[in-house]
Amino acid sequence: MNISEIKELIQALLDSGVGELEVQRGDSRVRIVRGATGQEVVVPAPAAVAAAPPAPVVSAPVVPAAPAAPKPEEGLLTVKSPIVGTYYSAPSPGAAEFVNVGDAVKPGKVLCIVESMKLMNEIECEVSGTIVAKHVDNGQPVEYGTTLFTVRPN
């Protein structure tokens, strides 16, 4: 792997918003990790892989800061992303959003879509209630466990 290929990989990491990228071509292997300060770190990985699992990498979250959540109240439930992907608030560009703050929801109501690996995954509400807050903007990348909505159950 030459320097221009590594630069392309760094650009791909920046464009995608992921926190880490690892690529192996033949005997060459490179791992690029987005650092806690937002700077990228290129770590050439050894060609031979040891049997031990890799050490965890601690870094700042990749997801941009979400809008401020309402003051914590007892009884509020959060809807979290079950997968890593891209959050979409509507079924298609220009269409009405699935839900807005203040909307009443019932179990099975589609709240949003999280696209992962070109698959559109509908995230449904599991309780009856009212949407109190939306924590993610349309088109934003989300991680596993990212809070998407806050719901006040009925």
Image (spheres, rainbow, N blue to C red):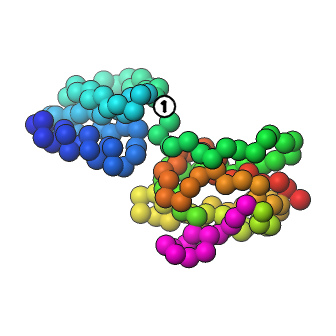
- Please say whether residue 33 is one of the residues in the magenta stretch: no
Q: How many marks?
A: 1
Q: Residue at x 26, y 44 (%)?
A: 11
Give whichever of 19, 124 is nearer the camera: 19
Q: Residue at x 33, y 44 (%)?
A: 14
Q: Is 125 situated left or right of 144 in this image?
A: right
Q: Looking at the image, which residue is at 80% across and 40% down?
A: 72
Residue 105 sits above or below residue 23 on the image: below
The outermost residue toward the right is 154
Is 47 drawn above or below residue 93 in the view shown? above
Judged left or right of residue 30, residue 35 is right
Residue 65 spot, x, y in % from top left: 56, 42
**Numbered disc 1: secondary structure:** loop
Residue 48 visible in the snapshot: no
Residue at the location (77% across, 55% down)? 132
Quadrant of res 96: bottom right
Instruction: State the residue position of label 1.
Output: 60
Residue 81: horizontal and vertical position, in percent?
Answer: 60, 51
146 to the left or right of 75: left
Q: Return the x and y of residue 142 as percentages of the image width and height.
A: 52, 49
The part of the chain drawn in magenta is 90-101
- Name the quarter where the C terminus is drawn: bottom right
Front residue (pair 6, 73): 73
Residue type at mark 1 is Ala
